[in-house]
Image: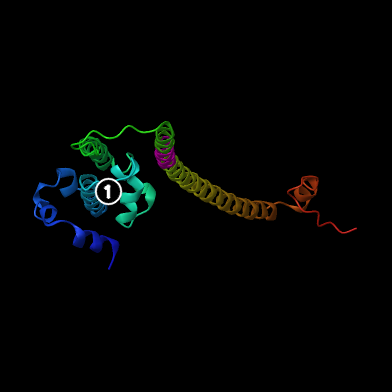
């Protein structure tokens, strides 16, 4: 079973029944956009369920990650970027804000007041939070670098294609020009030969000094 078929099978019935409520940019978009959107919806509901059940242990687990969505849909990690999927990226940003609010609501502060933590426990929690923030920053920075790198590759490839096409045209132009010059030279030599044949011996002798007239005199 392909990744895309698996996503479709695992989607909740509520999601499958609301296909008609998809955004217009999905309904009118390409198959790639539709596959990515379905993967994003599936991931969104999985994260929501984890948050509500208290299973989300880190900030990263409470967010939609572009590269992860692309992989779930069976595409390259870099395909989900504003240059290629602007509407989807805006939708992901919006859903991440909703997930952030949801995770705040479902933090384990129910009923009893939590016991005071020791200095050592607080330091350990701070270290964990710093590590999570660092991981998130590195992940987002890597995504930005990948987007930039892939964008430059496309730009470079397009530039090389244009340059190659221009050089081909120039080469063809020079080849045609050389062919025309060779033909013109051959025709000129034929004309010179005819003109020389029309001269008298005396006139030919007078023109011996010119490079265009061959020296056929015998010693």
Under circle 1, the secondary element is: loop
Q: Residue under circle 1? A: 55
Residue interval drawn in magenta = 130-144
Work out whether residue 210 or residue 159 is closer to the camera in this orientation and state it: 159
Outermost residue, bottom direction?
Answer: 1
Left-right relation of 194 to 74 = right
| Quadrant in which the C terminus appears | bottom right
Examine the rendered structure and indicate whether residue 219 appears above or below residue 24: below
Image point (25%, 50%), residue name? 43
Count residues near mark 1 (Cα–Cα under 10 Å), then give few for <14, some for 14-19, many for 20+: few
Examine the rendered structure and indicate whether residue 88 appears above or below residue 172: above
Instruction: Give yes or no for residue 137 being in the magenta stretch.
Output: yes
Outermost residue, right direction?
Answer: 219
On the image, the x and y values in percent for residue 65 come to 33, 45
Left-right relation of 174 to 143 = right
Quadrant in the rendering for residue 122: top left
Work out whether residue 10 or residue 106 is closer to the camera in this orientation and state it: 106
On the image, the x and y values in percent for residue 82 come to 32, 39
């Amino acid at each position: 079973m392909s990744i895309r078929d698996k996503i479709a099978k695992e989607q909740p019935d509520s999601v499958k029944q609301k296909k008609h409520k998809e955004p217009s940019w999905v309904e009118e978009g390409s198959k790639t956009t539709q596959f990515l959107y379905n993967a994003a919806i599936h991931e969104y509901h999985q994260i929501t369920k984890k948050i509500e059940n208290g299973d989300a242990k880190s900030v990263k687990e409470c967010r939609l990650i572009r590269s992860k969505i692309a992989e779930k849909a069976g595409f390259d990690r870099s395909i989900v970027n504003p240059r290629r999927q602007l509407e989807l990226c805006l939708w992901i940003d919006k859903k991440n804000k909703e997930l952030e609010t949801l995770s705040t609501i479902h933090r384990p502060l129910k009923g009893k007041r939590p016991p005071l933590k020791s200095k050592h426990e607080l330091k350990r929690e701070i270290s964990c939070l710093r590590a999570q923030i660092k991981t998130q920053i590195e992940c987002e920075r890597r995504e930005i670098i990948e987007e930039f790198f892939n964008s430059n590759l496309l730009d470079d490839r397009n530039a090389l294609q244009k340059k190659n096409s221009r050089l081909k045209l120039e080469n063809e132009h020079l080849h045609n020009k050389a062919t025309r010059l060779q033909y013109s030279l051959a025709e000129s030599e034929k004309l010179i030969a005819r003109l020389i044949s029309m001269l008298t011996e005396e006139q030919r002798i007078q023109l011996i000094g010119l490079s265009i007239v061959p020296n056929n005199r015998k010693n």
